[in-house]
Image (cartoon, rainbow, N blue to C red):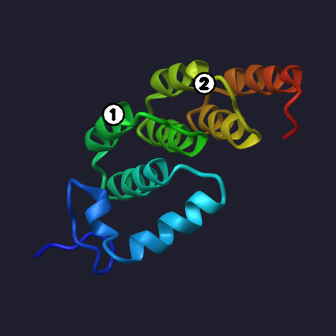
Amino acid sequence: SRTGLRGWPQSPNLHHNFNGAGNFVDARIIKTGFDPNTCRSNFHMKHLLRRGEFSEARRLFDQMPHKNIVSTNMLISCHIKSGNLLNARELFDSMVDRTAVTWTILIGGYSQHNQPNEAFKLFAEMHRSGTEP
């Protein structure tokens, strides 16, 4: 059988992949205040993105009932890597809360794709928002 990450069986049902050990992982995640379903989905999305399965990762993201900043940052970063700055910016603009990491991902993306004016404008916007770099 094909494996995903070093012995983790691939399955559309990610919870199946954590069989047994998943209970311990879920308990640790819940104890820290995170949603285990979101964490599992983020893990799976990261795996899909590393394999270059962007459309599958996007479908998973769109179906996630609870997205967190990690989910969105991963997708923004992927849009940037594929040169799709418009979608990256739309996703960024749709976010209610952003961290310095979120701002830096998009600012760096503009710089990498030779759009220094957009990078500078976004940096100024970040400064006005009160977010420290």
What residue is drawn where x is 79% and y is 28%?
Answer: 123
- Helix, strand or loop at mark 2: loop
Residue 95: numbered disc: 2
**Residue at the extreme bottom of the image, as rendered:** 7
- Helix, strand or loop at mark 1: helix
Which mark is first along the chain, 2 or 1? Answer: 1
Residue 71: % across, % down: 50, 42
Q: As displayed, is residue 34 above or below residue 19?
A: above
- Residue that mark 1 sits on: 63
Quadrant (top left, top right, bottom left, bottom right) of the C terminus: top right
Report whether 6 appears left or right of 68: left
Q: As displayed, is residue 33 above or below residue 28?
A: above
Q: In which quarter of the image is residue 70?
A: top right
Q: Tag 1: Cα neighbours inside 10 Å, few (<14), some, or many (≥20)?
A: few
What residue is drawn where x is 57% and y is 58%?
Answer: 30
Residue 118: % across, % down: 68, 21
